[in-house]
Amino acid sequence: MPEYLKKGDEINIEKIGLGTFVVRLEMPTNFIDDINKMYDDAKDLPEHNKNLAGKIEDEFSITDILTDDMRNCFLTCFRQYLQVIQRPIWHCQLAGAWINDMKAGEYNPFHFHQSTLSHLGLSSVLVLKRPSTYGKEYSRDDMPSNGWLEFSGGQQDPLSVSQLRQDAQVGSFYIFPYTLLHGVYPFNGTDEIRRTLSFNCDLFTEMQHQMNEIASEKNLNTSSKKFSTVEDQWSTEDDSQVRANPSAWI
Ligand SMILES: [Fe+2]
């Protein structure tokens, strides 16, 4: 009798996924350092707590202080996500960005995102600082969760991955759809902060994109305000109007 798969045989194996993808990019150190410095030097940043799910005291909008180079870098990453998941047809339009400084005992309940312009888009988590310890695990040291970022697929199919828990490290940039539930567990035993940046990016079809362009041009023609190409993408509307659904946050 032939033996088809003998010990030592080499065969090609490929995992082919369906469903939602989280893409992690490792960002360069100077990018992380520059954002941290910009944030530490910034004064009177707008509080962002009322728009966010986090049980976190220090949450500030940084949309207006990011440099064009930084914005373009984020935009490139969002486009890269669409390339990786083989859906490059969508048009990316950056929405708002904010930074969370999470202290011991604070946490980010599970939530999903949306923006004022679209329920379809990509959100993200970029780790800027991570405490050297997340403290004592009160049980099951073998399954740590203190300070970890978790994504939930919402289903418990025994043959699929329903939960993804990550000890997100400085420089790691996670991109995922607005609709994907995610949260961060509290930690303890340290005075150091866990700092993350989140950026929302709306997605539009070609038709929607063209209509946005036309609307934008009309706006420019009727307004004395002069926007640059990049600034043109920022919504200046009050974010609070999206609070109709309390489980959806920008
Ligand atoms: Fe979030």
Image (cartoon, rainbow, N blue to C red):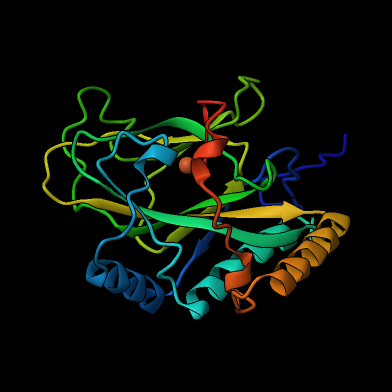
Q: Residue 120's spot in the image, x, y percent? A: 70, 44
Residue sitting at 52 percent across and 32 percent down?
243
Q: Residue 175's spot in the image, x, y percent? A: 56, 53
Q: Quadrant of residue 223?
A: bottom right
Of 34 and 215, which appears nearest the observer? 215
Vertical arrangement, residue 219 with respect to residue 250, above or below: below
User: The N terminus is located in which quarter?
Assistant: top right
Q: Quadrant of residue 135?
A: top left
Q: Residue 113's spot in the image, x, y percent? A: 56, 40
Vertical arrangement, residue 42 with respect to residue 158, above or below: below
Of 158 and 28, which appears nearest the observer? 28
Count all numbered tags in the image, as a single digit: 0
In the rendered structure, the answer to whether residue 207 lies left or right of residue 98 reads right
Q: Can residue 209 be seen at all in this image of the molecule?
A: yes
Residue sitting at 77 percent across and 54 percent down?
204
Residue sitting at 77 percent across and 42 percent down?
5
In the rendered structure, the answer to whether residue 159 lies left or right of residue 172 reads right
Residue sitting at 18 percent across and 47 percent down?
133
Of 13 and 215, which appears nearest the observer? 215
Q: Can residue 145 be seen at all in this image of the molecule?
A: no
Q: Residue 165's spot in the image, x, y percent? A: 45, 37
